[in-house]
Image (cartoon, coloured by chain):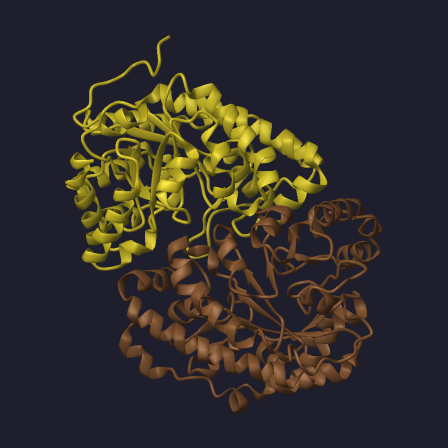
Chain colours: A yellow, B brown
Amino acid sequence: MLVWSNMKNFDNDLLLRVLRGERAERTPIWIMRQAGRYLPEYMAVRAQHDFLTMCRVPELSSEVTIQPVDIIGVDAAIIFSDILVLPEAMGLNLVVEEGKGGPRFTNTIRRKSDLSSIHAADCENDLKYVADAIRLAVERLNGRVPLIGFCGSPWTLFAYMVEGKGGEFVHARAMLYEDPATAHEVLQLLTSSAISYLKMQRAAGADVIQLFDSWAGVLSPRLYEEFSLRYIKQIVDSLRNEVPVIVFAKAANHSLRKMGDVGASAVSVDWTISIDEAAKTVGGVVQGNLDPSVLFAGKGTIRSEAEKVLAQAPKGRHIFNLGHGILPGTPVEGVKTLVDFVKGWKAFERN
Amino acid sequence: MLVWSNMKNFDNDLLLRVLRGERAERTPIWIMRQAGRYLPEYMAVRAQHDFLTMCRVPELSSEVTIQPVDIIGVDAAIIFSDILVLPEAMGLNLVVEEGKGGPRFTNTIRRKSDLSSIHAADCENDLKYVADAIRLAVERLNGRVPLIGFCGSPWTLFAYMVEGKGGEFVHARAMLYEDPATAHEVLQLLTSSAISYLKMQRAAGADVIQLFDSWAGVLSPRLYEEFSLRYIKQIVDSLRNEVPVIVFAKAANHSLRKMGDVGASAVSVDWTISIDEAAKTVGGVVQGNLDPSVLFAGKGTIRSEAEKVLAQAPKGRHIFNLGHGILPGTPVEGVKTLVDFVKGWKAFERN
């Protein structure tokens, strides 16, 4: 069996080695949302273009994708994009207005009759710009580090499609109770679309895939299993022989054991569980889980808190990351301090 | 020892009996944030007065306090107020502007030097309006059901005081890592103020106290124990011989066992854990935990989801409630359906 074919040679393949269960001489680090938000170099590009243009123009998205590799020195790049471009390709109308909260959809899926307004994503046409951005980013990375592609989990995308915007996702949750059949129909359509979207990303050059279940936390364990985890498993099943997959769910540590069972190469956890308990529960490779607010503290505090995570994590089965996306306004110096500390952590060898 | 002195006679004392561990013939129900938001009768009063006036004028707050007893038929009233009036009495400047997000403070506590701008609350003077509202509400309830007083947890109030507004509380979290000594100083001042505030509420006629740790979920288990739970325990220790105390923490089920150990009469849980698992973990009386979004579904769904909670909960050691405050826009008919169903649930007797 050809597992994770088309393996390339990288100057730094630490992330891939940990995901494959191979020996690594130190803990790799990358940072969720590392491209954007806090980097002056990102802000300079962003000042010239609106957010969706940044996503849609491969020259721009590939440029900001590689910035943190150049500037911060992380061990992987992650393609700059937004999880909502997939539902957009399925028929929803995505708008991002400056200073008016987060992105939103002007049409929503609230009942069975709304299904007529959505369709499976035609990724090769409507999301070709993502594949192009990945190809360009791979070219620009030039073998330095692997590139991560990504997608929102079906539940997280569903929550946005039903609600139209971020928040408590009341209507999305109510639909699970009131009309589970329609919910499952939408989730299945999202799952198929996500699979072709991610296969396209893989074909374009993504070396790793991460699934973001950002809104897992608003579900009870019972609903999480029925409406989120089973679709995540479908995606992992379809991809795991082609590419390593990392699954991240925010605020759903109640289901961590089941998350460990879906067959992903790693499970990424938030900061509301200790990384050693997470590792014991998951069983395999874990990613995470420094509280993103630590990066607002001084250098000494950043190092000592990072060390707590490193010391507790299972050596060789840990990818350092934050417990959630890096926060807007995070001081760049703090991020550099973190990355340098993790890369230079000497105690790794003594364990 | 005189435990919970000044016991009054109530037409309906189900809530108190469950909290005392006495026999109750059915499960009592009340609803977090039951006064306000979704009731047309509340909105009619609110249309005439801004939010803070509603809190500060005892005639108004006591009026909306008893509305859900009259209209919905809940087994307890909870005084209409806001958790932020306590930090306001400690020196912060609270503003609520219509349509501009939630309440906020125009001054904040970000560093040690900011401590000079706050002081212990002089409750008898600066929060006398809350005591007056409680006295009026007790009079208007006229012995029908008990009245619940409340306060935010020190951590939750601290988070608001540092940040100035709701959100991810990044600066509050960062301060716990960077300057724990100052954080503890503020938390201790909040704790002493909360204790005198709650003793005043008790003296004015509150029959039960609930502590709301609404922002528990942004802390790791380690920080939660050090910066939230230990102060909650101080409050419970100071009050438990005078009045039953219910502790509610949102999104902190990782620490449920420790929450069960603080000596409260009941622990209230959100909907991200099954109520039977919560009861086993806590050991005593549990409150909760229907997903508030269920009330947006049809009557049949509301009844079947409520029945799942009732069937799983320990009979006689359960107070029915939502897993969080009732959501704005919740249909009143749904709330009535829920309350009627819980009050009429026949299977209680068969267990």
Point out residue A313 in the picture as x, y percentages from the top left corner: 30, 39
Instruction: Decide if residue B183 is on the left or right side of residue A226.
Output: left
Q: State whether residue B234 is above or below residue A61.
A: below
Residue B110 seen in this snapshot: no
Please name the residue shown 56% across and 62% down the image.
B248
Which residue is situated farthest in the top direction here?
A1
Instruction: Decide if residue B324 is on the left or right side of residue A134.
Output: right
Q: State whether residue A45 is above or below residue A261.
A: below
Give whichever of B20, A91 is nearer the camera. Answer: B20
- Determine which quarter of the picture holds residue B36: bottom right
Please name the residue shown 42% across and 27% down the image.
A264
Which residue is situated farthest in the bottom direction here?
B125
Point out residue B274 in the picture as x, y percentages from the top left corner: 62, 46
Quadrant containing the N terminus of chain B is bottom right
Residue B334 seen in this snapshot: yes
Please name the residue shown 52% across and 76% down the image.
B238
Give whichever of B137, A149 is nearer the camera. Answer: B137
Point out residue B170 in the picture as x, y percentages from the top left corner: 36, 59
Instruction: Decide if residue B313 is on the left or right side of residue B125.
Output: right
